[in-house]
Image: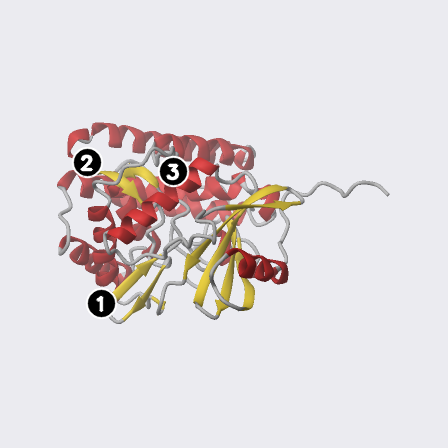
């Protein structure tokens, strides 16, 4: 018999994972293990005698052992500080990470506590509470240190590598590609012009869009720190600004978020000045993430309508917040144009842009 054909991404059996969980952790009887979503990683909802948990199975090659150890160390640091986050759960032997042999290679697996409550409703009041929770994470990690290495959320991560992934998709639209490249240069020059010593830097979640959290009473519990790393706190804040857009409701959420954040921690003028720049960086980073992962997610949805929408949003944001002449866009860009992977995968792949509430950029 011929050897199995090579694969890049498999789905591990939920039933087999349930048996492995019961044998590996002090959970009591595992009554259910269900695939929640697949995207950057696979997440399974676990029901056990000792409560609900979420199992994350990383894609093969997605994160190194040291990068995962950094994330775990940050979460345990936050837990010791009393910050509400979904915490990693140690196995019977004391280890946090296990490595599961899959057809495409070894995949890391980490079990987390389940964040209690429900998703935030996007109201101003809950945006205010979310802002307080973001500030509490920044404050609690000011003294975070670890020997584990993690990629930095710098301009190489946010712009240079994403642009390299985007270029092949816009070869037939050189004017639009040039517009994105020049806007990325505006971001680079703008960040460089800000007083570096006044920009708040430290541990960042990397994905503070408002959807990676549950709320119960007054407590907002954060989860999914897979995009975390050292970087500019202004970028962390800008992700929320990017997520909700600039309509009346979005502006109200942004104002409430800032109010909540400032109730726990100040925001410097340099950091606020950097937010419009990092909104653009976020938009480019996300498209680069999509483009770089087509081997697992497919590429048909990265069509002209997808790029039209990005260019339209970037043009409008530049004109309103960064100055300069808006660039022309090939095709008829429209806010109503479709974008994104199939509905079943969209929320997982674009975790910061749920299918029902797409960001402008």
- The residues tagged by marks 2 and 1 sit, at their Cα atoms, a distance apart of 28 Å
Q: Earlier in the sequence, mark 3 or mark 1?
A: 1
The structure residue drawn at horizontal position 42% and vertical position 38%, both measured from the top left corner, is 67
Residue 232 in percent (x, y) is at 26, 38
- Report the front residue among 46 and 344: 46
**Which residue in the protein does label 2 denote?**
199
Few, some or many C-alpha atoms within 10 Å of disc 3 (few <14, some 14-19, many ≥20)? Answer: many
Q: Quadrant of residue 159?
A: top left
**Residue 337 visible in this rendered orientation of the protein:** no
**Which residue in the protein does label 3 denote?**
327
State if disc 1 and disc 3 touch (CB < 8 Å): no
- Report the front residue among 133 and 267: 133
Q: Which-is-in-front pick, marks 3 and 1?
A: 1
- Report the front residue among 77 and 334: 77
Relative to 44, residue 235 above or below: above
State if disc 3 and disc 2 touch (CB < 8 Å): no
Which residue occupies the extreme front position in the image? 93
Residue 78 in percent (x, y) is at 28, 50
Q: Earlier in the sequence, mark 2 or mark 3?
A: 2
Residue 351 in percent (x, y) is at 44, 54
- Numbered disc 1: secondary structure: helix
**Which residue in the protein does label 1 denote?**
125
Q: Which-is-in-front pick, marks 2 and 3?
A: 2
């Amino acid at each position: 018999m011929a050897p199995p054909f090579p694969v890049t991404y498999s789905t591990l059996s939920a039933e087999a994972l349930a048996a492995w969980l019961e044998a590996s952790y002090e959970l009591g009887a595992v009554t259910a293990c269900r695939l929640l979503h697949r995207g950057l990683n696979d997440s399974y909802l676990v029901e056990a005698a000792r409560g609900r948990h979420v199992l994350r199975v990383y894609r093969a090659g997605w994160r190194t052992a040291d990068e995962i150890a950094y994330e775990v160390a940050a979460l345990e640091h936050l837990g010791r500080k009393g910050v509400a986050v979904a915490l990693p759960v140690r196995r019977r032997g004391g280890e946090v990470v296990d490595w599961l042999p899959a057809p495409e290679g070894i995949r890391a697996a980490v079990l987390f506590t389940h964040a209690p409550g429900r998703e935030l409703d996007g109201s101003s009041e809950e945006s205010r509470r979310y802002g307080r929770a973001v500030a509490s994470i920044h404050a609690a990690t000011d003294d975070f240190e670890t020997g584990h290495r993690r990629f930095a959320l710098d301009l190489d991560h946010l712009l240079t590598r994403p642009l390299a992934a985007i270029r092949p998709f816009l070869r037939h639209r050189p004017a639009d590609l040039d517009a994105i490249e020049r806007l990325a240069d505006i971001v680079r020059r703008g960040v460089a012009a800000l007083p570096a010593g006044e920009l708040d830097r430290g541990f960042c979640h990397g994905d503070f869009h408002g959807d990676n959290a549950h709320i119960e009473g007054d407590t907002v519990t954060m989860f999914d720190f897979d995009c975390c790393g050292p970087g500019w706190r202004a970028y962390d804040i800008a992700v929320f600004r990017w997520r909700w857009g600039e309509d009346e409701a979005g502006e109200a959420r942004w104002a409430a978020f800032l109010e909540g954040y400032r109730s726990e921690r100040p925001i410097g003028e340099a950091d606020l000045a950097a937010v419009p720049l990092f909104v653009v960086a976020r938009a480019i980073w996300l498209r680069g993430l999509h483009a770089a992962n087509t081997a697992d997610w497919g590429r048909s949805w990265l069509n002209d309508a997808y790029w039209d929408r990005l260019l339209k949003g970037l043009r409008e944001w530049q004109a309103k917040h960064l100055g300069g002449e808006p660039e022309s866009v090939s095709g008829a860009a429209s806010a109503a144009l479709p974008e994104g992977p199939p509905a079943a995968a969209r929320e997982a792949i674009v975790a910061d842009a749920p299918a029902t509430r797409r960001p402008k950029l």
